[in-house]
Amino acid sequence: MTDFTIRVDQNKYLPAGSQEVHGIITVEASGPVERAAVAEAAEVIIIDTSGSMSYGKIADARKAAQAAVDTLRDGVYFAVISGNHQAEVIYPGDGRLGPVNAQSRHAAKEAISRLRAEGGTAMGRWLRRASDLFSAHQVTHPGAIRHAILLTDGKNEHEPAPEFDANLTYCSGKFTCDCRGVGTDWVVAEVRRIGSTLLGSVMDVRRPEELEADFRAMTEAAMGKTVADVALRVWIPRAASLNFVKQVSPALEDLTGRRTDVDALTGDYPTGAWGGESREYHVSVRVPGGNIGQEMRAGLVKLVVPATGEVLASGNILAQWSDDPVQSTRINPRVAHYTGQQELASLIQEGLQARNDGDVETATARLGKARGIAEKAGNEETAKLLDKVIDVDPESGTARLKRVVDKADEIALDTRSVRTVRMRKDPEN
Amino acid sequence: MVTGACPVCGTRVLAGEAFCERCGHDLSLRPVSCTACGSASVGADGYCENCGMLQPTGRDHVEIELEALAGVSDRGLRHSRNEDAIALLAPGQGVLVAVVCDGVSTSPRPDEASQAAVDIAAAAIAKRLADGDDAEQATREAVRLAADAVAGSARIGEDSPACTYVSAVVAGRQVTIGWVGDSRAYWLGPQSALLTTDDATPGTHMLTAWLGADAGEVVPHIRTFTTDGPGVVLLCSDGLWNYYPEPEALAANALNDTPLTAARRLVRLANDAGGHDNITVAVIPFGQGERAETTVAFPKERSD
């Protein structure tokens, strides 16, 4: 059984008249390492087979998909989808998922080896097909952890935007999906929308030959999930309002709009499936003003399985008004850290956007500031990527955009802008 | 040191006691309805499940409910501690005793002074009545003993602890009020009235009389009246009457409810109005259930 704990980091003291309360919620899931009692799992592997995947990429994609099939545990239910302007289930192909065993592994890998690159790109249709497979599977296996892997190398050119939107909405909540973009022709914003909607990661894979190891690692992580469909349940006082609920680690994800009302004061925010891992959330609540000395519960955060109502862990976000400025002006280091991480991501995304729009001044200002924050906060990888886009004079701090930037570096910087680092050292420990 | 009464049976309990020795009531329990929003959904962890406010503990918020009377004392919203104190007794034979004292904030340890005063006064009234004194004699003696206790608590080198005093003794159809300072008693009914005159410079909170070593000889005002009711005798500290001085406004919120509900409501009204001071309210319903035989609504006075 997986054990969950919730820890809340905050400074509960507010100066008189202040109404903004912030807390960083750290959720840790831990449990037995061996997988004897793991939950049922269902996996769909989606491989881009559009025309642009030729020139060798398709060979690496085949290897990667085969590695993923090899990594699946026996007994897991799975399917493989070949995606171009339409979606074809190349294994098992009867509208269902099939169980993993030696024979089905062999057959699936055989089918994968026959994949060819031709046609266009319509990712929403691939996902809809996967969603239907999961839905059919859920009828007989209601508790299964449903996960997909999506590989793409290009822009979603052959699916009108409204159809893509509708397909994403259709899939939302039915499964989680980790996405990988290979090469430099895919659009980060598009794939990020998929990852956000389906609560999965998005990463760039610079060289096709790196796909195999990446797919193996991703599948292993999926096999390590033990609890499906967990939600963060947030209660706030009647007179309060919720500013936002965001995942801030391992990557930024604004969950505010993903609320499902439980009652007038309580809502659920989806977090997908959990294995042995830790994630952090930033919750901000606006409370009615209080008087000096009064203490209020500004938020009650629980990790729940909405289907059963089971509460896995819970923690309080508090507010207490104080006339002691030493208490009330202290900023919790973890809140400060993740506030900085959110600013860093915005600066990078705005800076890259400005750069593409030809607004050199804004781009330089944003990316230069991002470089400073990245260094201070310990985002070493981000700092290195920023160095490929911008030069900052270490003496004067003057920033200047680089003339020539490798497209792969730009994509990596954009993709990874939402990935956060944890605090370098925790002063409370 | 005596610090209060068990909210269930009224037995005196000592500081630090977790359970009432007589009835076993868990004294650590917080109020069941929220002191901030009034909703009846306070969780086991002490936070209101409606408005989120942590419920006060200990002297910050005291509720006492005896069979026939009830009182609530609350820190209010602006003061760091509750310097008011309240004691209620039902010594038997239909006699009810309520005492409210308001510690003077500018004096040292006003919270100790007020607590000592209510404890001693309530016990003294009950004892004197049992010994055959009438209510006025008992009240006078209670004020004398309470004043002595407060005066005697002064320490060398500091100002004298000080507090106000108001008490009510209800015996049969007779009500005896005694007071020193600006804590008040009201008669609330079809014709409501303020029963006390403040010992304070008009328009200010400058007390002209109080219990304390620097008060000189303390001479209480005492009034006795008889009434057929129905109505309520209300004792309160200025934390309430600063906001609601008019008897009619108090009556509108104190009648037709259980004493505890009425006391809670009045305290919440004061907090809603700003809660600038500690708020203490004692509610003694009078003539309830005798409505049919009521003939006189307004109290007949017999002042000293």
Image: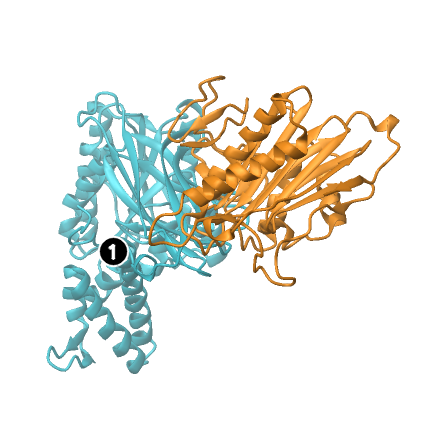
At 28% from the left edge and 67% from the top edge, which residue is drawn?
A348
Identified by mark 1, the residue type is Pro
- From what the image shows, is residue B177 above or below residue B129? below
Q: Colour of chain A?
A: cyan
- Residue B15 position, x and y percent, is 39, 31
Query: Is residue A24 at least partly visible in the picture?
Result: yes
Q: Residues within 10 Å of mark 1 (few under 14, many from 20)?
A: some
Q: Quadrant of residue B276?
A: bottom right
Relative to A164, is B222 on the left or the right? right
Q: Residue furthest front?
A: B217
State the residue in front, B31 or A415.
Answer: B31
Q: Which chain is orange?
A: B
Query: Is residue B48 at least partly visible in the picture?
Result: no
Relative to B86, is A356 on the left or the right? left
State the residue in front, B88 or A308.
Answer: B88
Q: Residue furthest left?
A: A395
- Residue B189 position, x and y percent, is 79, 40
Q: What subunit carries mark 1?
A: A
At 19% from the left edge and 61% from the top edge, which residue is drawn?
A377
Q: Which residue is mark 1?
A: A333
Placement of the C terminus of chain A among the 4 image quadrants = top left
